[in-house]
Image (tube, helix red, strand yellow):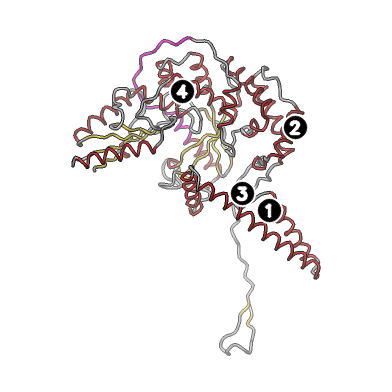
Amino acid sequence: MKSIHVEEIAEQHRPVIADVCMLFSKQAKCKVETRIRWWKLTNQTQRVLCEKITTAGLPDPYGPIDSTCNAAASTILKCARDTLEETKGGKRGDRAAWFWDEELQRVAKAKKDAYKACQKIMSPETLAEYKLKKKEAKREVARARSAAMDELYKKLDSLQADKYVFRSVRARHKASLDLSEVRAVKDEEGNVLRDPVAVKQRWRTYFSQLLNEEFPRKKRVVTAPTAGPVQPWTIEEVRKVVKKMKVGKATGPDGVPVEVWKSLGEPGLQWLTKFLNNIARSARIPKAWRDSIIVPIFKSKGDVMDCANYRGIKLIEHTMKIYERLVDMRLRDVAEIASDQFGFVPERSTIDAIFIARQVMEKYREKNKPCHIEFLDLEKAYDRLPRTVLWEVIRERGIPEYMVKMIQDMYEGATARVRTVHGTTSKFTIAVGVHQGSALSPFLFIMTLHTVLKHPLEGPPFTLLYADDVALFADSRAELQPKVQKWQLALADSGPKVQKWQLALAES
């Protein structure tokens, strides 16, 4: 350490220079696996990928199911890596601007190369080249931003404006949260775990217990199976399902997204239809489809280190989701859902339920009478739905036995792994509940709920449901109490329970 005498500073004030050694904590890196750049699948790359897959050739769709599934996934992934390349993995960085495209990437790289050349050899020529590239990059960024904003304004003027507004608000709210990753969790006794191995084991233990615990219930009357021939899937049904599925969604363990089947066109749909019919005839899905990855999503309430405040979403194979949607389509043609259920039913939504609730309250106000509403929620409704009850309900609704066998096979031998910031845990079996994130689970759940609640259901406007969220209407509190008791008794016979801490009463 030394002081420096400077004339401009008063005699009693002198600059001090010191060499200080400081030990900074090493920033922990989040383990990110390499991924294929599916977001680069444009019209041009789609044609290239389709040509490569066609040249390599998909296996015989009528061959052994497991080997056919593995060979098809291997061929698709190999061609995709050659066409789209992979990310490097390592630490997860910030995403590029939402309006970023290939042209901006090229211009930004040219500006960066010009900057490096200018730093290496400082001359009027290199400096002028860098300034030119910088202006060009700035101009292209402004052009891309303006084009993206124009497209956004067009969407806001469309009939789907509300969807885009709420999506933008949710994205902004999520970006404002000071929660990027949670590296420590609490055990069952409330002790904080920081060791990566202990954290992974805690996540595995929590979900293993959650997805393998049933509520006590009574035995239901067994219904005789409904016989019927196996109805093969048609290419029109497969085309409709593939077209309906959204792109840009997280893939399952095999890494093959639905974008591949959309890109392969008619030949791909023909191969997929034959392969899915082969599975339907044997009533045995591929072994790879039985595995899934659970991603814990914070519910934005409660302690961030408490595992109970996370919702586990399962990442399932996209090809299996196509198979599930085909089964879902057939089930909806046979099973009818009550009119008071507004969740996961075509041409019904929360808007209808909210409108009915408002109309009921307005009518009560017109008559100058109090309106009492009680809101119920079911405890771990999806995760702890007994599967034996599910099979009994499906047979009770008159579903053909071959479809019952197909659905049972989807849940037989199901396993899962939990993806954490410290890596992925080992596998564990799942024996209870329906899959969170499955395309078939919502309809299976509401069909089961409607069957076990035939007597307590009064129909709208006195009973409104959205999946497992329930609203009961009555003229007084005394009238509400027996309604709630009926619900509790009916649900207790089949497994689900009403969460007492989420009972709420509203009066108008």
Give the label, 1 or 3, closer to the camera. 1
Give residue 107's quadrant in the image: bottom right
Q: Label 1: few (<14), some or many (≥20) within 10 Å?
A: some
Tell me the tag on residue 51.
2
| Cα–Cα gap, marks 4 and 1 | 46 Å
Q: Is residue 68 visible?
A: yes
Q: Which numbered tag is attached to residue 104?
A: 1
State the CA–CA distance, disc 1 to disc 3.
21 Å
Q: Could you tell me which quadrant the N terminus lies in?
A: bottom right
Which label is found at residue 301? none
Question: Is residue 124 positioned above or below 207 on the image?
Answer: below
Residue occupying image coordinates x 29% and y 28%: 487
Q: Nearer the viewer, residue 298 or 55?
A: 55
Q: Earlier in the sequence, mark 4 or mark 1?
A: 1
Measuring from the top left, give residue 99's x and y in whole percent: 61, 51
| Secondary structure beneath label 3 | loop
From the image, tell me which residue sits under label 3: 92
Measured Cα–Cα span from mark 2 to mark 4: 37 Å
Distance from label 1 to label 2 (Cα)?
A: 27 Å
Residue type beneath disc 2: Glu
Q: Earlier in the sequence, mark 1 or mark 2?
A: 2
**In the image, what residue type sits under mark 3?**
Arg
For label 2, count other residues whose C-alpha is less than 10 Å away and answer few (under 14), some (14-19) or many (20+): some
Q: Secondary structure at mark 4?
A: helix
